[in-house]
Amino acid sequence: QVQVAETGGGLVQPGGSLRLSCAASGRTFSSYTVAWFRQAPGKEREFVAAVRASGGNVQYHYANAVKGRFTLARDNAKTTVFLQMNSLRPEDTAVYYCALEDSRLIVSRLWAGENYDVWGQGTQVTVSS
């Protein structure tokens, strides 16, 4: 059974950085989409970023709210996806979730959580002075 697990959350001051990790276990995929979503208290879950991969074709996508501040990367074994978060703001405070779909989603389907089959438990990110 495929599982994903997030690590790396914590408390950071405004302007600081954190790196989240999403590790997949169970099997490897030749084509997949891994996304990060977040949910702040009292708000709906929102898309943050995603990587789509099929063979050697890899594309990264970011929500406007994080573009230029957050960056995705993969490890060479393609089992872990990292979300580097820089210039963090209080409004970035949320529980961050990793989600996996074992196919390369079309772009229009990236933003909706129901298109992903596997979810992690989430990791808390708090940006506060």
Image (cartoon, grey):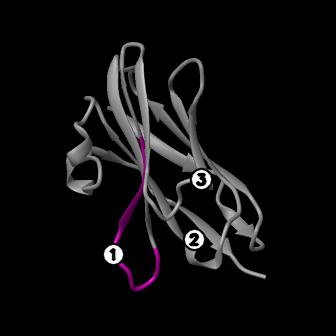
Horizontally, residue 107 falls left or right of residue 35, namely left
- Residue 74: image location, x then y, percent: 56, 30
- Residue 44 numbered tag: 1
* Residue at 22 percent of width and 37 percent of height: 106
Give how far apart the Cα atoms at labels 1 and 2 are.
13 Å
Residue 126 location (% of width, % of height): 65, 73
Q: Disc 2 designates what residue?
A: 92
Residue type pointed to by label 3? Gly
Q: Nearer the viewer, residue 123 or 26?
A: 123
- The segment highlighted magenta reads 40-50
The earlier-in-sequence mark between 3 and 2 is 3
Q: Is residue 46 above or below residue 7?
A: below
| Dot placed on the residue nearer the N-terminal end, 1 or 2 | 1
Q: CA separation, marks 1 and 3?
A: 23 Å
Q: Is residue 2 magenta?
A: no
Instruction: Return the x and y of residue 65 as percentages of the image width and height.
Output: 49, 65
The vertical placement of 84 against 128, above or below, is above
Residue for badge 3 = 68
Residue appearing at x 74%, y 73% in the figure: 14
The quarter of the picture where the N terminus appears is top left
Give residue 98's mark. Answer: none
Tell me if label 3 and label 2 are in contact, CB under 8 Å. no
Q: Quadrant of the C terminus?
A: bottom right
Question: Mark 2: which secondary structure?
Answer: helix
The number of discs equals: 3
> 74 or 69, which lies in front?
69
Q: Taking 78 as reference, is 84 above or below it?
A: below
Circle 1: residue type: Glu
